[in-house]
Image (tube, grey):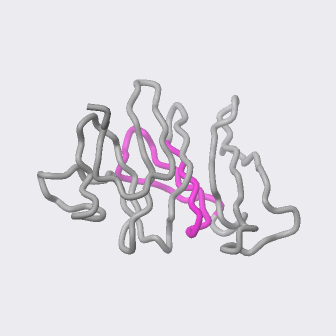
Amino acid sequence: SPVFSYGHRNPQGIAWDAEGTMYASEFGQDTWDELNVIEAGGNYGWPEVEGIADDDDYIDPVQQWSPDDASPSGIAVTASDILIANLRGERLRVVPLDDLTTSTERFGGEFGRLRDVVAGPDGAPWVLTNNTDGRGSARPGDDRILRLDSD
């Protein structure tokens, strides 16, 4: 089949780890945004379910967040973490690869909406702000590409 997986509402970022595992950050509709581990042939439930369904017919996300706290956008995978830029949530979410059910938040509100993230050659995250599109609070010099301290 030309379809790798289905039941996705609105993937915003896709990234792979060193072993070839695919991850996707996805906008939900109203209730839950998601981080999914993508499996070939997998059904992720949309439009029947949003977020964790606990239904064997669908693959549940490994994490879900309220759109007010997330609106996940671009993602990057480093040797140890998944980094997720968040638009509405205005934060960088860090998910350890050795425990996909936990996360920490960095830079909450400090730079406004974060559209994308990449890992630089030294592992430090580089993020793209997205505040001048009428949805964020534009600051002098926005939109910017920022290298953030990786500690």
Number of numbered tags placed on the structure image: 0
Residue at x 13%, y 57% (from the top left corner): 55
Q: Which residue, as the protein is rendered here, is positioned at the far right?
A: 140
7 with respect to 130 (left or right)? left
* Residue 36 is inside the magenta segment: no
Where 136 falls versus 123 (above or below)?
below
Q: Quadrant of the C terminus?
A: top right
Q: x, y percentage for residue 118?
A: 63, 41
- Residue 143 lies in what quarter of the image? bottom right
Q: Nearer the viewer, residue 49 or 82?
A: 49
Q: Which residue, as the protein is rendered here, is positioned at the far left?
A: 56
Q: x, y percentage for residue 105?
A: 55, 59
Q: Nearer the viewer, residue 56 or 65?
A: 56
Residue at x 71%, y 68% (from the top left corner): 133
Q: Which residues are magenta?
A: 82-107
Where 48 falls versus 101 (above or below)?
below
Q: Nearer the viewer, residue 60 or 124?
A: 60
Q: Nearer the viewer, residue 8 or 143?
A: 8
Where 40 falls versus 149 (above or below)?
above
Q: Which residue, as the protein is rendered here, is positioned at the far front?
A: 2
